[in-house]
Image: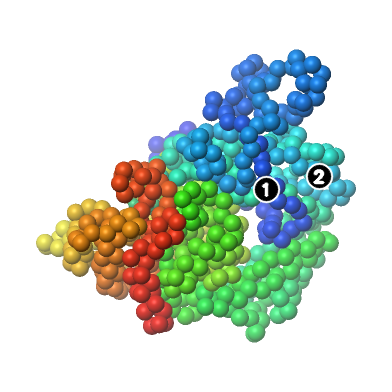
């Protein structure tokens, strides 16, 4: 939870030293497999653009009248004569489907950017000997959570889960859950308001009420190392968390036990069983992992594989790997995405990558995608690049902002480290080089390595174009490369800037020879169905020719280990307002917003089919 992050004055010289890795108080790993219920469905709401519900002017205006989270039985008050005065009534407010961004739910909320209060009533009596938690998969961007009028927790960060304990807040019968969701971003938020995607607001992913025993298994993680051992940790929480025997079974292949220390942690270490089938995109074998301790049972589905770098090669299970991928925003097919990614929608998108494009890899940009998507990547066999929205501009000099980034990163790692699909943690996207910026990213790289030494670290860097001896030279001039296992660059030559498509053949790429390179982005807009006889920008032909020229250029890069062009499908972006071609959509998709394939889709699919046949 980022709620504790305090504002501190900006020092003159870059962020403060790296704080210890931040671990959320509760993780409830594999929440979908736990005892509980989803609080999806119709939630009532009340807009609050002036933030009255949070403002208490010396107990004057808002306190008595406008604080939506108060546990007021307005109907009873009205039966008594209606003389009490409230300027809210969430029981009779309009309703919308949760999870989902409000922008897509009501036309009048399409561009609403601010605070909305949501209310959901549910029946849940306290259960003797059991603990109750609310786990939010994502509220964009800040959340205030109240149960029966009392604050249960707060969170900042629009794409990572958070858990609040509500054991002592529940009452017999009807309970009132009120959530303030604030979509506004500022110079100190991550991301800032300057992005190229829609900053959808609201309770965008599921909310789950989870029940546990008093002492319970909060987290368990396992991973296969290049030394052939499976290591990990089980973590209990509760009054009897210490000195408990934890038993871990990996399908029917192996079982092992360990005893928790005084903090409720038990380290796991066993040789990989001989019959273990390594997870690969072609054979994404997952095992049922069962952890028992203190009378609690935790179930997970896990794959086991290794990922490493050897010189300019990427190695999956010791074998060279070429990443045949594409970038993806979290937007389902359709003209009005609400970012409420359901399993069928996520499956359809990943299916296009895996079977339409012959891909084995997806860059989940520019923020952690839904847990549903990550679990499907594991199941369907798609390797994943994961990133948090440290994007373009961030307040690099501000230690409080760095702390937010590190916490967001920690929440992502703890959420997804059991997904075999995830191989890369990225620490930034297209951030202009400067001292404070590089120190900020370096702190993130150190943090993510400390949190998860089993995966690779990368960042999508800017490429510098200069002229030397009459030639155009493309080079990475970025001290951050020292912190990265895998180099990645975004390149748009032939789309932005003066280079023609024919010029791409003459670009001279000067790249470090000792490290794998991924083209993390390249792309060109095309309006689906728009064609012309010539090479005109925004036509399907131009985009297809652009792909041909860029793929040919990529073929000349000796360290190339993968591609994730920009992007699978058109996505909403308020930055893109060309009145003919864009109208609020970034058109670099290989698919239109409704899923229609553009010509370039076939170009990339052919390229990947050939690569796959060559074993890459
Ligand atoms: C980029 C950004 C991506 C944009 C894309 C574009 O480099 O990383 O977020 O959407 O370019 O379309 O310009």
Q: Position of residue 383 (x, y in %)?
A: 50, 68
Question: Residue farthest to the right?
Answer: 128
What residue appears at the point 66 percent right and 25 percent down from the top-left corner? 88
Image quadrant holding the N terminus, namely top right
The answer to whether 210 is drawn above or below residue 179 in the figure is below
Discs 2/1, front: 1
Residue 258 at x, y percent in the picture: 76, 68
Q: Residue at coordinates 75% horizontally, 29% vertically from top-left?
A: 71
Horizontal side of residue 106 vs 75, given as left or right: left
Mark 1 Cα-neighbour bin, 10 Å: few <14, some 14–19, many ≥20: some
Residue lying furthest left in this view?
470
Question: 161 left or right of 594?
Answer: right
Q: How many marks?
A: 2
Q: Which residue is mark 2?
A: 124
SS at badge 2: loop
| Quadrant of residue 475 within the rendered picture | bottom left
Q: Is residue 192 left or right of residue 374?
A: left
Residue drawn at point x = 76 percent, y = 17 percent: 82
Q: Is mark 2 within 8 Å of ligand 1?
A: no
Looking at the figure, which quarter contains the C terminus? Answer: bottom left
The numbered mark, 2 or 1, whose residue comes first in the sequence reads 1
Q: Nearer the viewer, residue 61 or 547?
A: 547
Q: Is residue 537 something one can see in this rendering?
A: yes
Residue 40's label in the rendered image is 1
Q: Quadrant of residue 596?
A: bottom left
Q: Quadrant of residue 584?
A: top left
In the rendered image, residue 608, in percent from the top left (x then y), is placed at: 38, 74
* Residue 610 vertical placement versus 47 (above, below): below
Locate residue 103, reporting x and y percent: 51, 41
Q: Toward the viewer: 401 or 90?
A: 90
**Residue drawn 28% across and 55% down?**
538
Question: Mark 2 and mark 1: span between their CA atoms?
Answer: 15 Å
């Amino acid at each position: 939870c980022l709620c504790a992050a305090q504002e501190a004055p900006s020092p003159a010289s870059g962020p403060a030293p790296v704080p210890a890795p931040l671990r959320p108080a509760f993780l409830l790993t594999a929440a979908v497999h736990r005892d509980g219920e989803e609080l999806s469905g119709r939630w009532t709401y009340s807009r609050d653009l002036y933030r009255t519900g949070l403002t208490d002017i010396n107990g004057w205006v808002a306190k008595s009248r406008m604080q939506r989270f108060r546990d007021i039985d307005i109907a009873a008050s009205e039966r008594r004569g209606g003389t009490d005065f409230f300027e809210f009534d969430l029981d009779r407010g309009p309703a919308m489907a949760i999870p989902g961004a409000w922008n897509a739910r009501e036309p009048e909320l399409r561009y609403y950017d601010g605070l909305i209060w949501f209310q959901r009533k549910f029946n849940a009596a306290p259960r003797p000997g059991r603990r109750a938690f609310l786990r939010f998969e994502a509220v964009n961007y800040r959340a205030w959570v109240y149960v029966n009028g009392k604050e249960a927790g707060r969170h900042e960060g629009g794409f990572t889960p958070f858990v609040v304990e509500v054991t002592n807040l529940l009452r017999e019968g009807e309970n009132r859950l009120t959530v303030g969701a604030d979509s506004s971003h500022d110079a100190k938020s991550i991301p800032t308001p300057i992005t190229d995607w829609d900053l959808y607001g609201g309770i965008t992913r599921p909310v789950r009420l989870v029940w546990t025993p008093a002492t319970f298994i909060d987290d368990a993680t396992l991973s296969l190392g290049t030394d052939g051992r499976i290591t990990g940790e089980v973590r209990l929480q509760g009054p009897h968390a210490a000195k408990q025997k934890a038993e871990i079974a990996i399908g029917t292949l192996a079982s092992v036990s360990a005893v928790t220390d005084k903090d409720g942690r038990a380290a796991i270490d066993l040789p990989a069983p001989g019959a273990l089938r390594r997870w690969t995109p072609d054979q994404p074998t997952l095992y049922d992992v069962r952890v028992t301790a203190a009378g609690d049972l935790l179930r997970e589905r896990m794959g086991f594989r290794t990922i490493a770098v050897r010189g300019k090669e990427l190695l999956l299970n010791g074998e060279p790997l070429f990443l045949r991928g594409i970038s993806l925003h979290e937007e389902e097919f359709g003209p009005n995405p609400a970012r409420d990614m359901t399993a069928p929608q996520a499956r359809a998108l990943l299916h296009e990558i895996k079977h339409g494009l012959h891909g084995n890899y997806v860059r989940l940009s520019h923020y952690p995608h839904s847990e549903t998507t990550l679990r499907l990547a594991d199941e369907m066999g798609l390797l994943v690049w994961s990133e948090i929205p440290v994007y373009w501009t961030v307040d690099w000099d501000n230690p409080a902002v760095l702390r937010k980034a590190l916490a967001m990163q920690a929440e992502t790692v703890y959420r997804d480290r059991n997904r075999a699909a995830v191989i890369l943690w990225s620490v930034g996207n297209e951030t202009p080089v400067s001292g404070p910026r590089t120190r900020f990213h370096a702190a993130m790289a150190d943090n993510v390595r400390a949190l998860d030494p089993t995966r690779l670290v990368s960042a999508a860097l800017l490429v510098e174009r200069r002229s030397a001896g009459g030639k155009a030279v493309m080079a990475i001039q970025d001290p951050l490369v020292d912190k990265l296992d895998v180099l990645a660059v975004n390149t748009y030559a032939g789309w932005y800037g003066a280079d023609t498509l024919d010029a791409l053949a003459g670009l001279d790429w000067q790249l470090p020879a000792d490290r794998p390179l991924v083209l993390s982005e390249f792309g060109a807009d095309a309006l689906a169905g728009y064609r012309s006889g010539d090479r005109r920008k925004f036509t399907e032909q131009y985009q297809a020719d652009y792909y041909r020229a860029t793929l040919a250029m990529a073929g000349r890069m000796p360290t190339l280990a993968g591609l994730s062009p920009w992007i699978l499908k058109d996505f909403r972006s308020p930055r893109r307002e060309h009145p003919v071609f864009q109208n609020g959509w970034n058109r670099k998709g290989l698919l239109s917003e409704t899923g229609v394939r553009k010509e370039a889709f076939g170009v990339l699919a052919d390229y990947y089919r050939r690569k796959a046949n060559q074993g890459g």
